[in-house]
Image: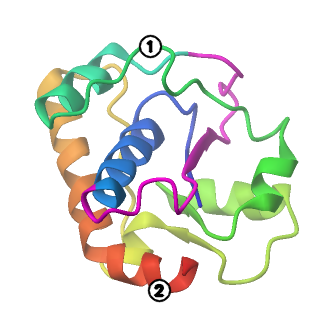
Amino acid sequence: MLVVCQANTCRSVMAHALLEKMLAARGLDGSIRVRSGGIGPHARDGMIPSLDARLVLREDGIHLAEDTIVSTDLKAHGDVLAAADLILTMTEEQKRLVRAQVDTAEGAVYTLGEFAGDGGDIRDPVGQDEARYRSTRDEIKRRLEASLERLLRLLA
């Protein structure tokens, strides 16, 4: 299972950490491998999660060290895309970029909103205030919660 955003420093990191917490709460930590990556032009291997993302995750009980999740540039790692049973992107454009990057089975790539059943992109909070990061975290969390049963059935 792979979550994708532009650079893999904000939205996909938050989704990655929140999903791992949800799986652990169900006693499923380690049974589903969660990875994250960036597909945009500014994605680079080895970037650390944004401070704002780590701060708002901490409010949710997730204490993410700088090196817990480091970014993966999916343009350079098609193997990560190809290995994923399910890919969830934050935007339609990212979904298009993922599909262009790898020959993925139709239906294995969704936006998180689409997978949760309510559609719409999750906007990038980069360069905005902490309240916007908090709102983005809450939107990602809500959509992950809404889609968790579907995700578990698909990856079981």
The residue lying toward the viewer, choosing from 112 and 31, is 31
Q: Quadrant of the C terminus?
A: bottom right
Give yes or no for residue 26 being in the magenta stretch. yes
- Name the quadrant containing residue 81: bottom right
Q: Position of residue 130 (x, y in %)?
A: 16, 23
Q: Earlier in the sequence, mark 2 or mark 1?
A: 1
Q: Position of residue 23 (x, y in %)?
A: 35, 60
Q: Please, is residue 20 above or below residue 128 in the view? A: below
Q: How many discs mark residues in the rendered view?
A: 2
Q: Please, is residue 14 above or below residue 130 in the view? A: below
- Name the quadrant containing residue 131: top left
Left or right position of 42 against 57: right
Left or right position of 47 against 99: left
The residue lying toward the viewer, choosing from 66 and 115, is 66
Magenta region: which residues?
Answer: 25-47
Q: Which residue sits at x=28%, y=65%?
A: 26
Give yes or no for residue 89 being in the magenta stretch. no
Mark 1 residue type: Glu
SS for dot 1:
loop
In whole angstroms, how far apart are the C-alphas of marks 2 and 1? 32 Å
The residue lying toward the viewer, choosing from 18 and 25, is 25
Residue that mark 1 sits on: 66
* Label 2 crowd bin: few (<14), some (14–19), many (20+), radius 10 Å: few
Q: Quadrant of the N terminus?
A: bottom right
Q: Which residue sits at x=58%, y=23%?
A: 70
Left or right position of 44 against 111: right
Residue that mark 2 sits on: 153
- Name the quadrant containing residue 134: top left
Mark 2 residue type: Arg
SS for dot 2:
helix
Q: Position of residue 40 (x, y in %)?
A: 66, 37
